Image: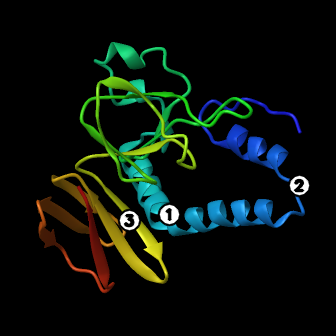
């Protein structure tokens, strides 16, 4: 398989995984099942990100300089991107690479897979045990559907976010949550602090 660079996607990562596994082996099937399940769980976040993109005329996937124009470290940074307002993705671009240098802009960032917190405005080495370097900005939310339940993960000790699909506003400080708006869905809140 040939690896082609697609600057703002995880395509090289998927192709790297395809080379590592025999396509008929259970390990490969389990790996693909994992990524497919994660994508399905993230549909509420993806949907909300699409709504914001339409409403605010801003790309769903965008270079860091789009949101952090004052940060000189992101001006020529071409191998990381923001996915929506909450996620920063830093694809693994080289074959057999398990870790990489990642620049985190201002604020606190949480590893999406381990929930480890990092201070921003510095370079870090991504955790080689994590599936993919993905970080969530403190003060934002990730809405997911897991096991048929609508879960909203609140990142950081305080923050404010809107869930457009339900037209609700969420504000939190510590473990105190204020929700404005109405929804017919049963929502489970989970704090990542």
**Label 3, label 2: how many angstroms apart (C-alpha)?**
34 Å
**Residue at 76% over, 41% down:** 16
Of pointers 1 and 3, the one earlier in the residue sequence? 1
Q: Secondary structure at mark 2?
A: loop
Q: Quadrant of residue 29?
A: bottom right
**Residue at 30% over, 78% down:** 188
Q: Nearer the viewer, mark 1 or mark 2?
A: 2
The one of 170 and 89 positioned closer to us in this rendering: 89
Give how far across and how far down residue 164 sits, in percent: 32, 64
**Residue at 39% over, 77% down:** 150
Q: Which mark is residue 42?
A: 1
For residue 71, above or below residue 60: above
Q: Residue tagged by mark 2?
A: 22
Q: Residue tagged by mark 3?
A: 143
Q: Left or right: 87 with respect to 139?
A: right
Q: Left or right: 115 with respect to 59?
A: left
């Amino acid at each position: 398989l040939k690896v082609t660079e697609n600057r703002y996607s995880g395509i090289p990562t998927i192709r790297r995984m395809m080379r590592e596994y025999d396509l008929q082996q259970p390990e490969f099937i389990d790996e693909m099942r994992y990524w497919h399940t994660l994508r399905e769980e993230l549909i509420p976040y993806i949907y909300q990100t699409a709504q914001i993109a339409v409403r605010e005329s801003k790309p769903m996937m965008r270079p860091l300089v789009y949101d952090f124009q004052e940060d000189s470290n992101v001006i020529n940074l071409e191998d990381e991107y923001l996915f929506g307002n909450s996620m920063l993705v830093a694809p693994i671009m080289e074959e057999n690479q398990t870790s990489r240098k990642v620049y985190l802009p201002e604020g606190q960032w949480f590893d999406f897979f381990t929930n480890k917190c990092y201070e921003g405005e510095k370079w870090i080495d991504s955790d080689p045990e994590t599936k993919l370097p993905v970080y969530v900005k403190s003060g934002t939310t990730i809405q997911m559907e897991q096991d048929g339940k609508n879960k909203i993960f609140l990142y950081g000790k305080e923050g404010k976010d809107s869930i457009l699909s339900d037209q609700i506003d969420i504000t939190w400080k510590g473990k105190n949550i204020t929700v404005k708006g109405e929804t017919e869905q049963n929502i489970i809140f989970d704090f990542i602090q």
